[in-house]
Image (spheres, rainbow, N blue to C red):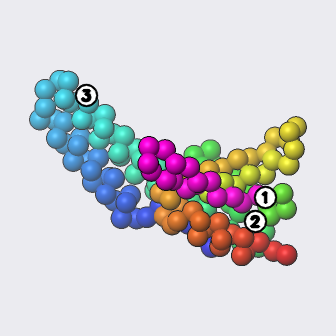
Amino acid sequence: MRWTARTAETVALALGGLLLVLAALTLDAAGRVLVGAAGVLLLVLALRDVLLRPRLTADAGGVVVRTLGGRTRLPWPGLRVRLRTTRRLGTRSRLLELDTAAGPDDDGVLVLLGRRDLGADPAAVARALEALRPG
């Protein structure tokens, strides 16, 4: 099973970033800096989406999370899969939490992934991961 950012969102980010960078060329100095920085930020986010494909994969051996630092394998034994739901300013957000820390002295791994990272609802991904977990 694999989850990754939606292709349409990545393309929209890249096009938006490109348009902002091009628009910045027609502005005054302050506008160039602000609009150009926003365009570059969108382009960097689109590039991040492309580099981190697929963001999360799961098989019988465990889960593999792709980050800018490389791939991290999280084997099923010791892996906790939870759904984090928070409310802030009237908006509810959900995050998929993958945690390997077993105790207070254990240097485990904590990974938080949102809807945009996964391209799917984190609750549905959590259910799919629990269904795939052996035993």
Rendered image: mark on residue 62: 2
Q: Is residue 58 left or right of residue 67?
A: right
| Looking at the image, residue 21 lies above or below residue 50 | above
Is residue 83 a member of the stretch shown in magenta?
yes
Is residue 114 a member of the stretch shown in magenta?
no
CA separation, marks 1 and 3? 44 Å
Rendered image: mark on residue 79: 1
Within-10-Å neighbours for mark 2: few <14, some 14–19, many 20+: some
Q: Give the main secondary structure, helix, strand or loop, of the magenta stretch.
A: strand
Amino acid of disc 3: Val
SS class, disc 1: loop
Image x and y of residue 1, in percent: 62, 73
Residue denoted by label 3: 33
SS class, disc 3: helix
The answer to which quarter of the image holds residue 2 is bottom right
CA separation, marks 2 and 1? 8 Å
Image x and y of residue 123, in percent: 59, 65
Amino acid of disc 2: Gly
Image x and y of residue 108, in percent: 79, 45
Image x and y of residue 60, in percent: 76, 73
> Sequence-wise, which precedes: disc 3 or disc 2?
3
| Looking at the image, residue 82 lies above or below residue 108 | below
| Magenta-drawn segment | 79-95
Amino acid of disc 1: Leu
| Looking at the image, residue 29 lies above or below residue 9 | above
Q: Are the residues at dot 2 and dot 1 in contact (C-beta closer than 8 Å)?
A: yes
Q: Residue at x 62, y 50 (%)?
A: 112
